[in-house]
Image: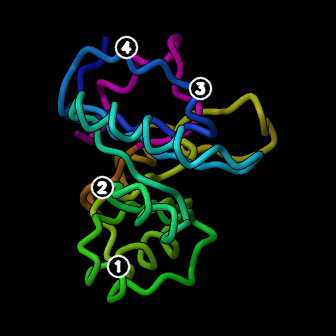
Amino acid sequence: LAFKKKYFLIIESIKDLDLKKIKKRNKFIIIYRNRGKREEIFNLISFRKKCKIKNILFYVANDLNLAVKLHSDGIYLSSFNKSFKSLNLKRIKFNIIGGAHDTKEIHQKISQGCKYILLSRLFTVQYKKKMNFLGINKFNYFTKRFQNLVPLGGINILNLNKTKSINSN
């Protein structure tokens, strides 16, 4: 298997992930990106507390109010999110992670103060087959120009070992 320093998991619901299956500490970052039915706040608070106990960083996507309520470790700014001002987020002392698909979006996420940038799509994905993907060579080209890029998209059990040749921690 490919061993990296950090693993980023994007979940749509807290029911998508069983925290008991995560054994390693200080390696996982969960990004909660709820697009569907809003989950009960007390369930989210309970999930957040379990993450804290297991030393799993917990980020909320694009919802500063929810991130503050949950005392999250930071906020995730999707590639389409151009509205957040980094000064407001730095005042709250949130870590910022961003999502990008190209050089222009990478520059935008850098200006927003993102610590890590999730660059998408590394491999083909099943949910949008017609969408372009980067591949390992193009991703590695980006990492020469920009640090702290994280590969995202299409990584599964069949191609996980290919991530060994990616220039990313």
User: Which quadrant does the N terminus fall into?
Assistant: top left
Q: Position of residue 102 (x, y in %)?
A: 53, 64
Distance between mark 1 and mark 3 Cα atoms: 28 Å
Q: Position of residue 26 (x, y in %)?
A: 18, 33
Distance between mark 4 and mark 1 Cα atoms: 31 Å
| Residue 156 highlighted magenta (yes or no) | yes
Please give the range of residues in magenta: 151-169
Q: How is the image coloured?
A: rainbow
Residue at horizontal 29 percent and vertical 18 percent from the top: 2
Please state which amino acid type lies under the numbered disc 3.
Asp
Which one is closest to the eye, mark 4 or mark 1?
4
Please state which amino acid type lies under the numbered disc 2.
Asp
Label located before the other in sequence (1 or 3): 3
Q: Position of residue 27 (x, y in %)?
A: 23, 31
Q: Which residue is mark 4?
A: 20
- Which mark is drawn over residue 89? 1
Determine whether label 4 and label 3 are within 8 Å by CB: no
Q: Judge left or right: residue 108 versus residue 114.
A: right
Determine whether label 4 and label 2 are within 8 Å by CB: no
Q: Which residue is mark 2?
A: 73
Determine whether label 3 and label 2 are within 8 Å by CB: no
Q: Residues within 10 Å of mark 4 (few under 14, many from 20)?
A: few
- Which mark is drawn over residue 16? 3
Please state which amino acid type lies under the numbered disc 4.
Lys
Badge 3 marks a residue whose secondary structure is helix
Q: Residues within 10 Å of mark 2 (few under 14, many from 20)?
A: many
Q: Residues within 10 Å of mark 3 (few under 14, many from 20)?
A: few
Badge 1 marks a residue whose secondary structure is helix
Residue at horizontal 38 percent and vertical 12 percent from the top: 21
Distance between mark 3 and mark 2 Cα atoms: 20 Å
